[in-house]
Amino acid sequence: MSYSAKIGPSILSSDLSQLGDECKRMMECGADYLHLDVMDGHFVPNITFGHPMVECLRTAVGPDPFFDMHMMVSRPEQWVKPMAAAGASQYTFHLEATTNPGNLIKEIRESGMKVGLAIKPGTTVEELAPWAGQIDMALVMTVEPGFGGQKFMEDMMPKVSWLRSQFPSLDIEVDGGVGPNSIHKCAEAGANMIVSGSAVVSSDDPRSVIALLKNVVMEAIQKRSLDR
Ligand code: DX5
Ligand code: ZN
């Protein structure tokens, strides 16, 4: 089993005027990576930031933190090179946003980033499956993308379980409404990369929340390896 438990705070719900400091704070509190939500007001009904912000964040936090770019944008092809140049580590695009995922996967790799492929709640996991062998990470959205602080959709868990059964070593990420109340479901289903926004960022004690989420996922991974 080649995957491990990783917690990636989404800084969408933090004080956006202090993003550099917020990113540093999350890393100091034990985050394994940072999940950065890019929204274009077209693919989703909200706007956040683009590659100029990512470049500033990279300068602020230094070369080490892994930036998982969650690209909630139409025409994701157009930001591959700018994001790579800005210091993005992984480019996670939405299957719904492109007609040629194979080509996009190739372009992302050629630009030196890892590849993530995301599906919205209405997209079946069978539609993602043909690409699973070519990507580094599958993202199963557990809310409709666009806003932080929404309710976790437990009915997405069969997608995670199916992916885990078919692709035992794939990194599988969940995003939306994930926190201490929903982490057990995600971990049992087989998710190993955990995005958590409001539950971590708005907590008085982010370090403890990150540690709790990570422990639950680590225990589930351990249990799965013993069951095999
Ligand atoms: C939603 C974003 C999420 C969001 C998660 O469209 O993709 O990353 O920030 O925030 P919570 O954990 O508060 O749902
Ligand atoms: Zn996200």
Image (cartoon, grey):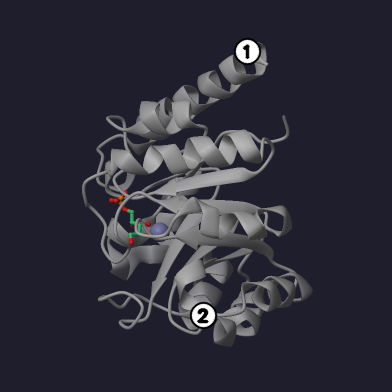
Q: Is residue 196 above or below residue 144?
A: above
Tell me what residue is drawn at x 67 percent, y 54 percent.
136
**Residue that carries the numbered disc 2 in the rendered image:** 51
Residue 181 horizontal side relative to residue 97, left or right: left
Q: Mark 1–mark 2 contact, CB under 8 Å? A: no
- Name the quadrant of the C terminus: top right
Q: Is residue 76 above or below residue 19?
A: below
Please name the amino acid that badge 1 sits on: Asp
Please name the amino acid that badge 2 sits on: His
The quadrant where residue 21 appears: bottom left
Q: Does dot 2 land on a helix, a strand or a loop?
A: helix
Residue 226: percent from the left, percent from the top?
A: 65, 12
Tell me what residue is drawn at x 27 percent, y 43 percent.
152
Q: Residue furthest bottom?
A: 78
- Density class for disc 1 (Cα within 10 Å; few <14, some 14-19, many ≥20) is few
Residue 1: percent from the left, percent from the top?
A: 72, 29
**Residue that carries the numbered disc 1 in the rendered image:** 227
